[in-house]
Image (tube, coloured by chain):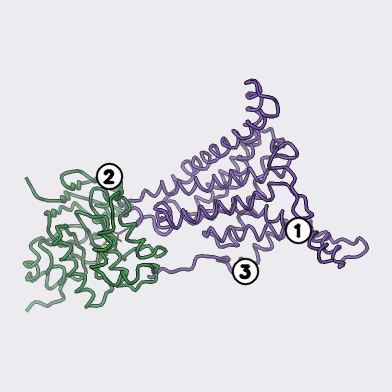
Amino acid sequence: MIGKLFSTCLPYILSGISVGGQYALIAIGYTMVYGILRLINFAHGDIFMVAGLIMVYSNVALTPLFMNMGLSAGSAFIVSIISSVVIVLVLTVILGLTIEKAAYRPLRNAPRMSVMISAIGVSYLIQNAAIYITGGLAKPYPASGAAMPWLSDQITIGSTSIKRVTVITPILTILLVVALVLLIKKTKIGMAMRAVSKDFRTSRLMGIEVNNVISVTFFIGSFLAAVGSLLYFTNYASVTPTSGAMPGLKAFVAAVFGGIGSVPGAVVGAFIIGICENILKGLDNILSTAGVFKDGFTFGFATFSDAFTFILLIVILCVKPTGLFGEKNTDKV
Amino acid sequence: MSNNILEINNLSVSYGGIKAVKGVTIEVPEGSIVTLIGANGAGKSTILRTICGLEKTKTGSIKFLGEEILGKPANYIVAKGITLVPEGRCIFPNLTVLENLKIGAYLRKDSIEDDINYVFSLFPRLREREWQLAGTLSGGEQQMLAVGRALMAKPKLLMMDEPSLGLAPLIVKDIFSIIKTINDRSITVLLIEQNANMALQVADIAYVLETGSVTMTGKGRELLEDERIKEAYLGKKKQ
Ligand SMILES: Nc1ncnc2c1ncn2[C@@H]1O[C@H](COP(=O)(O)OP(=O)(O)OP(=O)(O)O)[C@@H](O)[C@H]1O
Ligand SMILES: [Mg+2]
């Protein structure tokens, strides 16, 4: 009985961890940019979506190219996917840096609200540009379904069969997060990032070029969003111009939940949201297995899995606005 | 051939139309201690911030070691050898004491081990608190850290904006004796002080600033005896 219940829960927990990892990779971008600029980068979810589109178009362009070079259809596809991954990472980072330079840097001394409005503008600009380019159609993601040779392979854990990406995501996320935390805590640029996040002027007095440090922050945020995008869309059939909105919002809630400005907080928040959301998706099934719901009765918890995130947001904002790991103020006046 | 390390000529700075500094000329001889005194709002801090490249202006000139530095970015000016201990300390509260010192040496590529030890020998209390977050230091300790951090850049010219503000009289004495020690290591010091008495005692040259203009200048000791100074800044009545 317990064993049966466990094996019913396991796939939901596993995919929860996986989705949580993907949210975490996006949430870090929100939290780091907020930490340094006190700006909620509304365009971040759209950067994530663009990373998905870049994958689509890059693969469509490159596969025939490699076939013309004499590779078989199968290996041309694989080579194309691998090159596209590199292209996605590079172009997404360039996009993030360009947005910062064009839309946020000129407003460095403007009130915070102006920068927020600029961010909202950029978000719509990207979505509209995506509609223009895609014609508003859903673009099939090359790595999804059975097409992706390695990430989408089924593997078995215990009695559960899942896609390999489900296991890869959390491992990769944790590795990247550990690397990032070490960068922030142990390196010179990390020290500069922490200094700039407190005080621009005094940082300048130390000889720090504040704009460069901000660029590094956007570099890291966009890079991780690109990695998150590669993993996320592997589970979905297609990319649409609004594909970034929902995961972006959830990652943002994760960042607020963990305490915006804190990298570990965003990661913990993202995993909690990912897991809760997926357990909710399977709650009917789990409760039937446990014998709580009888005779095929279902409640339809899955319908509320998205709403859960936002209920959580409201609860945090009421109970602990600074989030789990929110900044404690150690300033002395 | 002058031996001035810093020459400010006819400098004016405005904040949105309001002139805070009006045609100021100041000379700082190499190896000296120079002090700026003046009432609140006279424009003292503005001058130091402009030297560092934090305030922008087009009128006047600031020459450091003969080179025009007005309009240059802050990181360029720091690299040339000017550091500022800002008004109100401005240590980084979320960095440890040691990290605050290290970030003072941000632009340096050589080994900073000796300089950290030198700062710790000036301020032994900082050594005991090496790993403490700077935001949890007492006000006096934060001031020591701010001075130590500025020294880490190995400056040729060290500027201090009211280093004794809010400190107990005993610590103020310490700070002034350390200013002397620093100066003995052939670092030129440009000092702003509310505590005019102390400042005039250590300074080789003093400038008196009133609402954006220099109204008086002379040797520190001489100004200490000046009746107008006594009345306005030292709180002593004319006999
Ligand atoms: N950022 C700013 N924006 C507008 N006005 C400013 C700004 N900074 C300074 N001022 C004004 O410029 C004048 C000079 O200020 P400054 O801080 O240089 O004075 P100060 O001599 O250092 O005074 P204190 O002894 O009180 O520190 C003041 O009238 C002040 O109100
Ligand atoms: Mg001042």
Identify the residue shown where x is 35% and y is 65%: B97
User: Outermost residue, right direction?
Assistant: A295
Label 1: chain letter: A
Residue A54 place in picture, x, y as percent: 61, 35
Q: Mark on residue B71?
A: 2
In-front residue for pair A144/A150: A150
Residue A98 place in picture, x, y as percent: 49, 40
The residue carrying mark 1 is A10
In-front residue for pair B125/B91: B125
Disc 3/disc 1 C-alpha distance (Å):
32 Å
Ligand 1 in which quarter: bottom left
The chain letter of the purple chain reads: A
The residue carrying mark 3 is A318
Identify the residue shown where x is 29% and y is 64%: B146
Nearest-to-viewer mark from 3 and 1: 1
Label 3: chain letter: A
A190 with respect to A135 (left or right): left
Label 1 residue SS: helix
A22 with respect to B128 (left or right): right
- Amino acid bearing label 1: Leu
Disc 1/disc 2 C-alpha distance (Å):
63 Å
Residue B12 place in picture, x, y as percent: 23, 51
